[in-house]
Image (cartoon, rainbow, N blue to C red):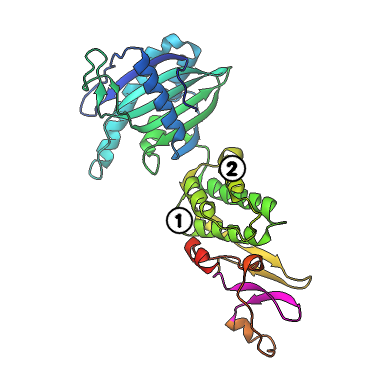
């Protein structure tokens, strides 16, 4: 969501959540320019978070979903609903602390709830904000009120359409993974996109875009990119779309100088929204293993199958002095299977002639070999 000067906010609440207390108490915060600035910054922060997943409610009777339904039906229900939601969060945080207290302590925070108009529909933001310095509305002292130096710990942004039906539910966390107590125990959501779906869709959609844009006119670069992609998926347990763009595309030097890498990178950057996969997820190795094989036709009678990433000098294109063009495959095993001829020198690949320098085991190794 873009940062705006003001938003059409209809209702809001501030509830400090303290697991050492038995109940929640709402803070009274004035509606003024400071609140507008805080809300805009908060929404921008939630929108910019990479660690974000799509979820859905399977039942409209779950407590948080039911309370939001009352709010969407009539904004006058907001105060009662926000109190119920805050009480539920306190109960679930107490339970989570009891279960995991020996391992880690939950970060203390304030639950900020906001109902605002978003285009033709309404949206609700539930954000747990870190308790740091607070801005006192009356005395301008840092001890009470709105979080002045806010840090979003966890958030849930729910968008409704004009008929009051849920369009999207986006959940984010400041940690590398979204806490289960937040999305499952507290919100009672179910994941819309699994790690299996994300792994398969992300790899397939990026690969398809590269094939569509590069395979015809930039074939050497296509194979380089594809193997960079395989290397990225093979060497990481967790996918980050931001990291993938930086590692696979960020500093790539094209074999064909006519290739505009920045344009390809921009197109790939939009794929999560277009294809419906999350920007961060745990990579499922078995799915990558199935997708990393590729077959390359050499002649009408001969294909070569590449099962995984390979060294940059394992396969090279070469032109002999008599003008014969071919592919040289470095292979001690294969060498024994074919008749030998007078030794010939295969030149190192240069520029566009490195057509079959299909992959490297790391981006750094590839750059060193070009």
Rendered location of residue 25, percent (x, y):
26, 18
80 or 135: nearer the viewer: 135
Residue 292 left/right relative to 124: right
Dot 2: few (<14), some (14–19), or many (≥20) neighbours within 10 Å? some
- Do the CB atoms of the residues marked 2 and 1 lie less than 8 Å apart? no
Rendered location of residue 290, percent (x, y):
59, 59
Q: Which residues are magenta?
A: 311-331
Q: Is residue 342 above or below residue 88?
A: below
Residue 77 left/right relative to 272: left
Rendered location of residue 271, percent (x, y):
59, 42
Q: Name the element at disc 2.
A: helix
158 or 152: nearer the viewer: 152
Q: Which residue is mark 1?
A: 236
> Label 2 vs label 1: CA separation?
20 Å
Rendered location of residue 71, percent (x, y):
45, 15
Give the number of the disc on residue 312.
none
Dot 1: few (<14), some (14–19), or many (≥20) neighbours within 10 Å? few
Residue 113 is at least partly visible in this image: no
Residue drawn 48% across the image and 46% down it: 242
Q: Which residue is mark 2?
A: 271
Q: Name the element at disc 1.
A: loop
Q: Quadrant of residue 5?
A: top left
Q: Is residue 91 above or below residue 204?
A: above
Residue drawn 38% across the image and 16% down it: 12
């Amino acid at each position: 969501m873009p940062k705006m000067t003001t938003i059409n906010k209809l209702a809001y609440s501030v509830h400090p959540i303290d697991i050492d207390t038995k109940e929640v108490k709402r803070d009274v915060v004035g509606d003024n320019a400071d609140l507008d600035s805080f809300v805009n910054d908060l929404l921008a922060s939630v929108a910019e978070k990479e660690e974000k997943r799509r979820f859905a409610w399977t039942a409209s009777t779950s407590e948080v979903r039911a309370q939001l339904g009352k709010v969407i039906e009539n904004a006058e229900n907001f105060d009662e609903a926000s109190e119920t939601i805050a009480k539920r969060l306190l109960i679930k945080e107490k339970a989570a602390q009891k279960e995991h207290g020996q391992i880690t302590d939950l970060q203390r925070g304030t639950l900020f709830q906001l109902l605002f108009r978003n285009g033709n529909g309404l949206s609700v933001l539930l954000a747990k904000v870190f308790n740091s310095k607070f801005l006192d509305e009356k005395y301008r002292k840092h001890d009470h009120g709105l979080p002045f130096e806010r840090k979003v710990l966890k958030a849930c942004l729910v968008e409704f359409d004009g008929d009051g039906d849920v369009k999207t539910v986006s959940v984010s966390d400041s940690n590398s993974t979204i806490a289960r107590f937040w999305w499952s125990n507290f919100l009672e959501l179910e994941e819309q996109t699994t790690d299996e779906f994300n792994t398969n869709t992300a790899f397939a959609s990026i690969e398809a875009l590269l094939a569509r844009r590069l395979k015809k006119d930039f074939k050497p670069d296509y194979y380089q990119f594809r193997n960079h992609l395989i290397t990225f998926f093979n060497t990481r347990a967790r996918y980050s779309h931001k990291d993938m763009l930086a590692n696979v595309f960020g500093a790539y030097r094209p074999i064909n100088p006519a290739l505009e890498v920045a344009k390809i990178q921009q197109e790939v950057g939009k794929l999560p929204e277009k294809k419906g996969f999350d920007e961060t997820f745990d990579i499922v190795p078995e799915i990558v293993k199935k997708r990393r094989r590729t077959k390359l036709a050499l002649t009408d009678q001969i294909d070569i199958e590449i099962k995984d990433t390979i060294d940059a000098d394992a396969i090279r294109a070469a032109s002999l002095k008599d003008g014969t063009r071919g592919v040289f495959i470095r292979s001690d095993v294969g060498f024994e299977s074919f008749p030998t001829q007078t030794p010939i020198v295969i030149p190192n690949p240069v520029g566009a002639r490195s057509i079959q320098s299909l992959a490297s085991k790391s981006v750094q190794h590839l750059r060193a070999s070009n």
